[in-house]
Amino acid sequence: MSYYDLDVILTDSEKVPCKFELEVPDLGYLDNNPSQPLKAGTSVNLPLWLAELLALTHQSSTPFLTLSLPPALGDNVLNALKADPRAVPLRDQSQNFYGLGARMLDLFEEPELGVVLRRSFVVRAGEVALHGRKAGATGDAGSAEDFMRGLEEWEKKLYRQAHEGAKGHKEWMDGVKK
Amino acid sequence: MYGDLGNKLVQYAKRTQSLGFLPPYQTETVRGVTREVRDLDKDIAQRLEPFGGSFNPQADQATACTLLVNHLSIRRNKRCLLAYHKSRTDKLEELAWKGFDVVDLAGQQVASGNAGSNLGSADGGSSSLSPQEEDYIRQYSDLLAAYKGQWTDIDLTGSLEPPRDLFIDVRALKDAGEIQTEYGAITLTKNSQFYVRQGDVERLIAQGYLQKLG
Amino acid sequence: MDIDDILREVDPTFDSIPVETRDLQALTRAWIAERSAPELLDWPADGLFERINDRIKKQIEKVEEMTGDMDPKTNFALIVIQTELERFKFLVRSYLRARVAKIDKHTLHYLSTADLRLRLSSTELAYATRHQALLHHHYLSSFLSSFPASLQNLNDTSGNISMIDTPDVDTAVFIRLLRDVVVRGKGTDVDGAAAGQHGDIFILRWSDAKGLVESGSAELV
């Protein structure tokens, strides 16, 4: 649905850990070793746009490589989210945290990951909406700033919508009074 | 690595999404990405040459893998280039619908003090648009004019705010020249005030020449 | 003397309002629906917009005739007619712009099948076709002609993402029921259904609402 969507394209440039299953003489540059062959078993970080199809394409029973979850979706992050979703600056993990999570859920059977992401999104979205409505008038300015700074792209869009919505509503109400 | 330049283009497009104008076209980066594509394609051709058209991926998995990496890199660059160019044509089209003039949009020299002139680069010198973009917006403006011509009485590029008052008070923020109304011509000199039909002055308000009062 | 009497004196066709009122209602409903639905809706096949465009032209001519007439009664009627005219023009303009925005966003999609193309008016079809051609030519002259021939297209659906963007039919919409019906919604974990009554308002995915709207059981609000 989104070939031209800039955020989707940038999410695809997120790197994931990959393990090559075969030796490829001319791909040493993927491991910053252009003069060396890429040996079987080598782990490299590759962008999703490359990694996904290499993992899915295979002529025999083994794919060219296998990939695993990126550190942004690692156990320590997930545990922190389970404890308190609002306290985790997602942007520090990945600008496109949920986009990345969604792509991983497409590729892996990870029901627990799905549950944690969904719950985190919903809880944080509530917080985002609150800030959007009260833009500029929060009581605890310090933690609000931290939270806002930690928003990833989906949440930033949500914030803009909440803010525009609240603003539009107020303008409309003012117009009605006149 | 292949695709890094393409990423740069997309990041650039994203950073400038919220701007009201179009920043300079990234000619060098676009050229760089296109060069990458040509290099990758040449590499594919060279690898396939010895097989004379009957390459069997099963028999040579390493080559199959390399070919796939090249192919995916070309596709990635295509996507990045398209997204970058489209983000700019989208913006140009948006401005055309808002009533900005083709001449302004093509980034030619405009006298300072004109509301619609900040589409070129800040120094008013060279154009922010590539020559192809200038061609495009000229052709698109023609298309828009033709489409509008099917609905002349509606004024398709008019205001999308629901009409409240037929007549409104306005003040001219700068010299805005002469406008035609059904009651005759009015000359809008700076700071003068008028009671005019909203429909006649919408465009001038949107472009900052006039301010609606009250 | 009230406003109706003044207008009737000035405009002898005043009593034929009912037809125009019906069209205004249809126009208003079409406008609301088009702004709410995430995909392009059908172009009214019964000539609604051709009639409205015609009527607007005639009203403008009438206004031009009446302008300059110094009779205060005419002047007042003139303002009323012009205000009405601005409202009509706004509705048509907003409707057409909403449609163009959707067409521009997913041009290849709407041009891709005969069924989809039928949703566009002939003017829109001409615009969409030409727009797409201009864009493709722009890309070719900017960079695309440096690509291998097989990749110079814009409608590649192989690979893991299609180049043809389509509207998100899971967008949320508000509907009002026009009859008592059961409203079914598909959920992430489980599907749901609710017994709705005439007048009830629901918010649900367009993909779930579409059937109800097309069958006349509900309207978009």
Image (cartoon, grey):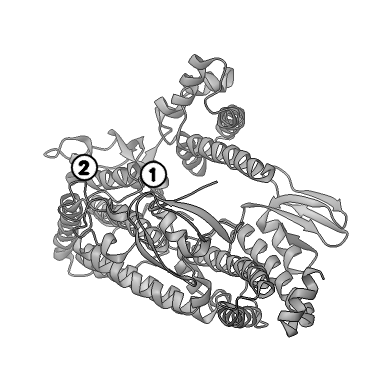
Quadrant of the image containing the N terminus of chain B: top left
Q: Nearer the viewer, residue C107 or C8?
A: C8
For label 1, count other residues whose C-alpha is less than 10 Å away and answer few (under 14), some (14-19) or many (20+): few
User: Above or below — where is A108 with respect to C97?
Assistant: above
Amino acid type at circle 2 is Met
Amino acid type at circle 1 is Ser
Residue C200 visible within the image: yes
- Chain where mark 2 sits: B
Q: Is residue C195 left or right of residue C6?
A: right
> Which percent across, then down, holds residue B35?
15, 55
What residue is disc 2 on? Answer: B1
For label 2, count other residues whose C-alpha is less than 10 Å away and answer few (under 14), some (14-19) or many (20+): few
Give the residue at x 58% y 69%: C89
Task: Decide which of tag 2 and tag 1 comes sooner along the chain.
Answer: 2
> Which percent across, then down, holds residue C119?
58, 75
What residue is disc 1 on? Answer: B18
Give the residue at x 21% y 50%: B26
Dot 2: what SS?
loop
> Which percent across, then down, holds residue C141?
22, 68
User: Above or below — where is B35 with respect to C73?
Assistant: above
> Which percent across, then down, holds residue B129?
23, 57
Q: Are marks 2 and 1 in contact (CB under 8 Å)?
A: no
Residue C147 visible within the image: no
Q: CA distance from mark 2 to mark 1?
A: 29 Å
